[in-house]
Amino acid sequence: MTEEAHSQHGYISSKDDYLKRLRRIEGQARGLQRMVEDDKYCIDILTQVSAMTKALQSVALGLLDDHLNHCVVRAAATGGPDADIKIQEASEAIARLVRS
């Protein structure tokens, strides 16, 4: 792998997929706003909030997987303080996801 490829983020090969998913989520958020503006039934809005939350969690888990398989693995192979930093970052990201 070239040095340039090593410096890219782990999600770079799936960037277009992530952008498509995030645009879909953005549309869901606009839909939720319309539902509230149109005084839709509470449970229907909550159902859509749940769907949007699951979609965001899916993006987060994909990014985490990419980070672990690219950034953390690369740093661990190199060793040194960067490996400790990447592992700590990943642990903190996992903790935030678990709490959310």
Image: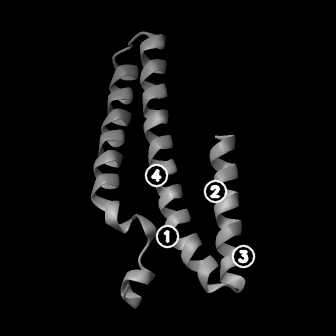
Q: Secondary structure at mark 2?
A: helix
* Three-letter code for the amino acid on which mark 2 is drawn: Ala
Q: Quadrant of the N terminus?
A: bottom left
Relative vertical location of residue 46 with respect to residue 4 in this rendering, above or below: above
Sequence order check: which comes first, mark 1 or mark 2? 1
Which residue does the numbered mark 2 point to in the structure image? 93
Q: Secondary structure at mark 4?
A: helix
Callout 3: 10 Å neighbours few (<14), some, many (20+)?
Answer: some
Q: Secondary structure at mark 1?
A: helix
Which residue does the numbered mark 4 point to in the structure image? 62
Sequence order check: which comes first, mark 4 or mark 2? 4
Q: Gap in Å between the C-alphas at discs 4 and 2?
A: 12 Å
Res. 84 mark: 3
x, y percent for residue 58 = 46, 43
Res. 70 mark: 1
Q: Secondary structure at mark 3?
A: helix
